[in-house]
Amino acid sequence: MSHNLLNFSQLELDQFVRAAGEPSFRAQQLGQWIHQHRVVDFDQMTNISKSFRQYLKKAATVRAPDIVAQQQASEGTCKWILKLEDGNAIETVYIPEASRGTLCISSQVGCTLNCRFCATGKEGFNRNLSLAEIIGQLWIAKRYYNITNVVMMGMGEPLLNYEPVKAALEWMLADHAYGLSKHRVTVSTAGVIPKMEELKKDLPVSLAVSLHAPNNNLRNHLVPLNKKYPLERLIPVCRNYFPQQGKQKVLFEYVMLDNINDSQQHVSELIHLLKGVSCKINLIPFNPFPATEYKPSSDSAIHLFQSSLVKAGFNTRVRRQRGDEIAAACGQLAGNFVDRTQRRHKWWLQRKSIPIIPVQTK
């Protein structure tokens, strides 16, 4: 059996090396060759003994998902469609900025949460991604771009695929792998409270919370997970997530939906809800997708909403729209996969829109 070394956590790679009769430091050497240098030919790993290289050629491989399509927007945003071994496809997005290059990584094939304003949720869900499929997105992107920031904001809810996501984050932070700063690696969640508490203990990465509504009634509608983990439970966890005087602050994401969550009543509720929470707020203009029932808030409504938050003392910015011309903007990632939930079929029937194109699987 050939082991895909991209699918090994740091601990598992160490166990693999020691099981082969090699000293433990070989795991760090292997990790450096694979993740930092992206070498797949074991013969090129020159500081590893010849005998172990021969063993690796028989027992192991380094295999990432395949790029089946690449699209680039005029402003530089790049989207890859990656085919997985089972025939499903996911999407990964690179966003260039003057001072950084951000990679938006997917954690699931689809998403279980079904947030009403998100294209991924309407496409349904197939399965969790493996470690190789998660870290493989960064491994691939590093071929083409200098990645300084990673956001787990692609397809899926990262904290519902906790162990592979955690292992991928550990590789991202490791000096002998990708060497990213804890301030430059962000996990986004809709509010899976038990796993938020685990993540807080396990890794010092940054946290983003998909909020999108200032009260339970509206959030129950927009983010159904709120029925299980309502705001009165979620906000205290966010308030205590980082040390009050530390540099890291919880980032709240708030998609701006016309006449849904963008009134002055909503902003007043939001100010009250987040009182005493050390945080930043990102206002995200809604990015439409086929058959959606929502429209983006007007520029004037967004500006007024932001001004009210700033006056109340909140660090608030409007996220610049990037990648919408190639359906790579926030909330637009859809991929191409078999939906095991039948959610996609029901959605298209309800909206009487684009026909379903089945995915060919092995």
Image (cartoon, rainbow, N blue to C red):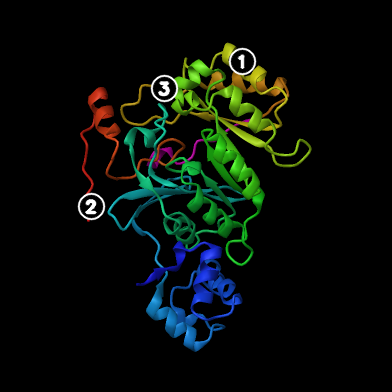
Depth check: give the residue in front, 304 or 231: 231
Q: Which residues are magenta?
A: 317-327
Q: Which residue is mark 3?
A: 295
Q: Which residue is mark 1?
A: 269
Q: Position of residue 64 (x, y in %)?
A: 40, 62
Q: Secondary structure at mark 3?
A: loop
Q: Which mark is residue 172?
A: none
Number of marks in the image?
3
Give the residue type that dot 3 points to.
Lys
Depth check: give the residue in front, 41 or 321: 41
228 vs 101: above or below: above
Q: Secondary structure at mark 1?
A: helix
Instruction: Specify which label sits upstream in the sequence, 2 or 1.
Output: 1
Instruction: Specify which label sits upstream in the sequence, 2 or 3.
Output: 3
* C-alpha separation, residue under disc 1 versus residue under disc 3: 22 Å
Which residue is depicted at the point 45% across and 38% down? 329
Give the residue type that dot 1 points to.
Glu
